[in-house]
Amino acid sequence: MTGGITARVLLLSVTAVATSVAQQPKRMTWKVDGLEREALVFAPTAQAANGKFPVILVFHGHGGNMRGFANQTHFQLAWPEAIVVSLQGLPIESNRDPGGKKPGWDSGPEALTEQHNQDLDLVDTVLATLHRNFQVDDARIYATGFSNGAFMTFLLWTARSSTFAAIAPVAGLIRDWKPPVPRPVIYIGGKKDPLVKPDSQKKTVSAVRMIDGANGAGQQCGPDCTFFASTTGTPVPVITHDGGHEFPPFATQAIVAFFKNHQLKR
């Protein structure tokens, strides 16, 4: 076992987990920067060992939505002790949607220069609400997302690095951002991805490994998985599956297994 990820875990399909009785989330709304925002909040269904609950923030891809992505990923079933929040993006421009008709995340190159980033402000607001309603474990707050949502996780690492213990981008890129501190990152990408191309994925992985001090030779950690140990305790497992631009079925279990092994050291 390397970094909590084994071949068995990586081959598990979330379909097996989803056969459990489905938990109904609570739809919550906020007014953030004058805009109506919403998310689906799955309360924990199991008691955490220390009485405090980890948090997973989940970001759909551009054109997706909170409910569809929650129904696809089932993080609440994979980690019943966690508070899982599936957030809803707002219409925003992208290369494939220049008119900004579909929902996504404000994670473009200019995101860090904006006086108020609507999605960073949303995350701050959501976490404040969770702290009022739950016993949140501040050492175990995580973010994961697909495509445009993966870009959002990289933005959170850069802009809110003191908050998040680890991130899990799926089919996303880090841009030219410079996260100020190392954090554990599990990266998942497709060999046939026509949008986030393999060469771009490799550049992102190289940048992440440099930031995390994970520059040594990798070790196999499962099918198409390479684990890069880190001198800073912030390892980088990289899983490159045979598919395209997608959130693969095994991703939820692999991400949860990784998150469970990492927390902030305060």
Image: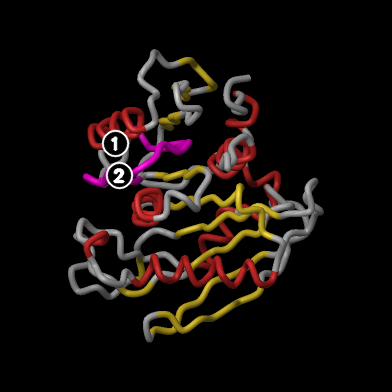
Residue 174 forms part of the magenta stretch: yes
Q: How is colour applied across the structure in the image?
A: secondary structure
Q: Is residue 250 above or below residue 79?
A: above
SS type, badge 1: helix
Q: Alpha carbon of mark 2 to alpha carbon of mark 1: how far?
A: 6 Å
Q: Which mark is residue 89?
A: none
Q: Residue at 35% across / 62% down in the picture?
A: 62
Give the residue pinned by disc 2: 173
The segment highlighted magenta reads 172-191
According to the image, label 1 marks what residue? Answer: 204
- Decide if residue 83 is on the left or right side of residue 88: right
Amino acid type for the residue under numbered disc 1: Thr
Label the magenta part by its dominant secondary structure.
loop
- For the residues bearing labels 2 and 1, Cβ distance under 8 angstroms: yes
Above or below for 95 versus 170: below
Residue lying furthest bottom: 34
Looking at the image, is 11 positioned above or below residue 31? above
- Mark found first going from the N terminus, 2 or 1: 2
Q: Residues within 10 Å of mark 1 (few under 14, many from 20)?
A: some
For disc 2, the neighbor class at 10 Å (few under 14, some 14 to 19, many from 20) is many
Residue 231 magenta = no
Q: Residue at x 23, y 68 (%)?
A: 93
In the rendered view of the protein, which quadrant contains the C terminus?
Answer: top right
